Amino acid sequence: MAINRTFTMIKPDAVEKGHIGAILEKIAASGFRIVAMKLTQMTKADAKEFYGIHKERPFFADLVEYMTRGPIVAAILEKDNAVDDFRTLIGATNPEEAAEGTIRKIYANSISENAIHGSDSDENAAIEGAFHFSGREMF
Ligand code: IDP
Ligand code: MG
């Protein structure tokens, strides 16, 4: 399987609860190399654009509120089969349905406040990484 990249955010709920270190440790232990990383906070306009695909969904306003209420850790990660393997590591969107040992199973509160983001395709990983990082911030 080819080496590729995915994009992640440790979301505001997980940052608030002090889980940055534990989550990064789990990511590193799973073989991902950090290509880019920063603590940042999205504006409302950022969140509306980032999650634009969900703008017609009933939870969109709550999602924008949640994702902008505090800092996030944004990162680009590299590994063979990065996109699919990272989705496996984070678990299902709804933590009640997430497999044992996954980041969402361990750290998420609910389907809305679910601790972490992972890109769903190589194409979206590139778009989402470029949304948060300039070329000079990627290594
Ligand atoms: P994903 O993050 O697992 O890819 P998506 O369906 O892309 O899930 O949804 C994006 C984010 O929107 C989720 O991570 C979660 O924070 C929120 N979300 C998704 N579905 C629901 C829902 O049914 N109710 C409330 N929030 C939701
Ligand atoms: Mg998604």
Image (spheres, rainbow, N blue to C red):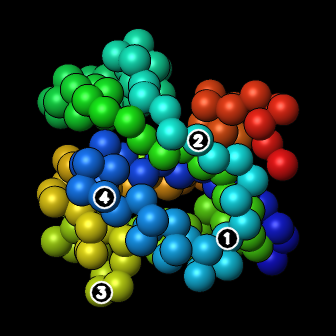
Q: Secondary structure at mark 3?
A: loop
Give the residue drawn at x 26%, y 48%.
Answer: 16
Contact flag, marks 4 and 3 (Cβ < 8 Å): no
Give the residue drawn at x 34%, y 62%.
Answer: 19
Please give the residue where the numbered disc 2 appears in the rendered image: 38
Q: Nearer the viewer, mark 3 or mark 2?
A: 2
Please give the residue where the numbered disc 3 appears in the rendered image: 100
The residues bearing labels 1 and 4 have C-alpha atoms spaced at a distance of 21 Å
Give the residue drawn at x 51%, y 39%.
Answer: 39
Please give the residue where the numbered disc 1 appears in the rendered image: 32
Q: Residues within 10 Å of mark 4 (few under 14, many from 20)?
A: few
Q: Which mark is residue 18?
A: 4
The residues bearing labels 1 and 2 have C-alpha atoms spaced at a distance of 16 Å
| Residue 112 placement (x, y as % from top left) | 20, 47
Q: Secondary structure at mark 4?
A: loop
Query: Is residue 114 among what the camera can see?
Result: no
Q: Residues within 10 Å of mark 1 (few under 14, many from 20)?
A: many
> Label 3 sits on what residue type?
Glu
